[in-house]
Every structure is written in C-alpha cells, then in structure tokens.
Amino acid sequence: MPVEASCHCGPVRLIVQAAPSEITECNCSICRRYGVLWAYYPKSAVTFEPAPPATHTYIGMIAR
C-alpha cells in the first residue's frame, strides 16, 4: 500500500510504494512538539508530485 505525504505548504506531495520497515523518533523540541517520526528511503523509491518547477523558487532560495 503506497504511503503519501506533503510538504508544509501543500503543493508538493511525495509517494513511496511501501510503509517503512523502521522509523526514528527524534527528541528535539520541534519534533517532540509535533510528534514527528522519521523514515528513510533511497531517493529512487520516492516519487514527487508535482515535480519541479513547483519547488524551483524554494530550492533557488536555499542555494543562495
């Protein structure tokens, strides 16, 4: 069963084809506040929708 998530502002979704086999619980103040759990996948296992240019401006701002 695919797992879907989205970025904070919503227009970009990511999809992986299977649930993670392992998750990590971070104990920093932000992750604790929001109940965040982390999963790690190889880049080839993740599909992004929509693909760039939806992230072009954001990525450009980070690269500065």
Image (cartoon, grey):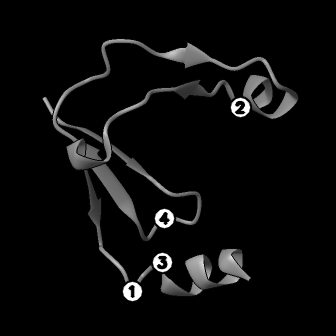
Q: Earlier in the sequence, mark 1 or mark 4?
A: 4
Q: Secondary structure at mark 4?
A: loop
Q: Earlier in the sequence, mark 2 or mark 1?
A: 2
Q: Amino acid at mark 2?
A: Tyr
* In the image, residue 42 above or below residue 46: above
Q: Which mark is residue 10?
A: 4
Q: Which quarter of the figure has residue 64?
A: bottom right
Q: Which of the two marks, 4 or 3, is nearer to us in this view?
A: 3
Q: Position of residue 10 (x, y in %)?
A: 48, 64
Seen in the picture, residue 63 relative to 46 is either above or below; the reply is below
Q: CA distance from mark 1 to mark 4?
A: 15 Å
Residue under circle 3?
55
Image label count: 4
Give the left or right position of residue 63, taking residue 46 as reference. right
Mark 1, other Cα within 10 Å: few <14 / some 14–19 / many ≥20? few
Residue drawn at 66 percent across, 24 percent down: 35
Of labels 2 and 3, the one closer to you: 3
Between the C-alphas of marks 3 and 1, the distance is: 5 Å
Could you say whether the residue bearing mark 2 is in a helix, strand or loop? helix
Task: Look at discs 2 and 1 and give the one toward the viewer.
Answer: 1
